[in-house]
Image (cartoon, rainbow, N blue to C red):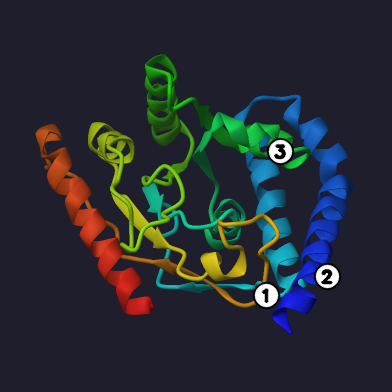
Amino acid sequence: MKIILQPFYTLYVLATFVASLLLAFPVFVVLGLRDRPEARRRIWTIVHYWSRGWLWLIGMPVTTIGKYPKGQKFVIVANHISYLDTIVIYAAIPEYFRTLAKKEMVRIPIFGFVYKQLAILVDRSSPESRAKSMRLMWRQLKNECSITVFPEGTFNETDAPLKEFYDGAFRLALNSKTAVLPLLFPDTVHRWHFSGWWKLWPGRNRAVFLPPVPVSGVASDKLPELKARVWTIMAGKLEELG
């Protein structure tokens, strides 16, 4: 039955995605003319409520588990297992943030234009781009909002609960003395499997917030230990969630 219905469901998802973004696109264009924090906050607010509404409309509602500590800034690290992660993260986090994203994301029609208003783009193959993105994230943490990072860098296609983490998120946390907030998406791979853009299927999306990992008093040379600690916490919880 799933094989028969999946193409029709996928068409429905794509149609509602494009239609809803097109309706809001003029607003994004006008707000995007001003590269200022207040404009980015307004765009984020629209995207936050749009993502929650759209995911509910297509039968993939987001349920949050755990407590998000409001009114604080964090380096938020999330596992990456599906194309859907980049949308669910906006529905899950209740306060304004900016995310580190691969520059290739802006090539997606319509969505790419909106995404670049909120993301800090990086070319992972360029040391200059990586260094620039680190400086921009540090400034954002100090002056504007939390930063989200997928520390695995790309989809986890292994049998392990998580791929090995890159250093960037943890170096940022240590340099800025900002706590790390782990966030897990255990269900998105079942909603939109990474093996094909058409492999969509409805169901719940849990967003699981784990307790913050403080970094105050942690020396910068303890980056490997911090990274390993966060990896162990997140991997253990993913295995528990199933």
Q: Mark 1: few, some, or many residues within 10 Å (few <14, many ≥20)?
A: some
For this view, does 80 lie left or right of residue 107?
left
Secondary structure found at label 1: loop
User: Residue beneath label 1, please?
Assistant: 202
Residue at the image position 67 percent from the left and 64 percent from the top:
52
Residue at the image position 24 percent from the left and 55 percent from the top:
230
For this view, does 128 lie left or right of residue 57?
left
**Quadrant where the N terminus lies?**
bottom right
* The quadrant where residue 159 appears: bottom left
**Residue closer to the observer: 133 or 16:** 16
Rendering coords of residue 109 (x, y %): 77, 37
For this view, does 137 lie left or right of residue 35?
left
Q: Which dot, 2 or 3, sits closer to the camera?
A: 2
Q: Are the residues flagged by discs 1 and 3 in contact, CB closer than 8 Å?
A: no
Give the mark, 2 or 1, whose residue is nearer the N terminus: 2
- Measured in 3D between alpha carbons, the distance from the residue under mark 2 to the one under mark 1, in whole angstroms, is 12 Å
User: Residue beneath label 2, please?
Assistant: 8
Residue furthest to the top in view is: 128
Say what amino acid the circle numbered 1 marks: Pro
Residue at the image position 54 percent from the left and 57 percent from the top:
82
Say what amino acid the circle numbered 2 marks: Phe
Q: Are the residues flagged by discs 2 and 3 in contact, CB closer than 8 Å?
A: no
Secondary structure found at label 2: helix
Rendering coords of residue 84 (x, y %): 60, 57
Residue at the image position 46 percent from the left and 51 percent from the top:
155
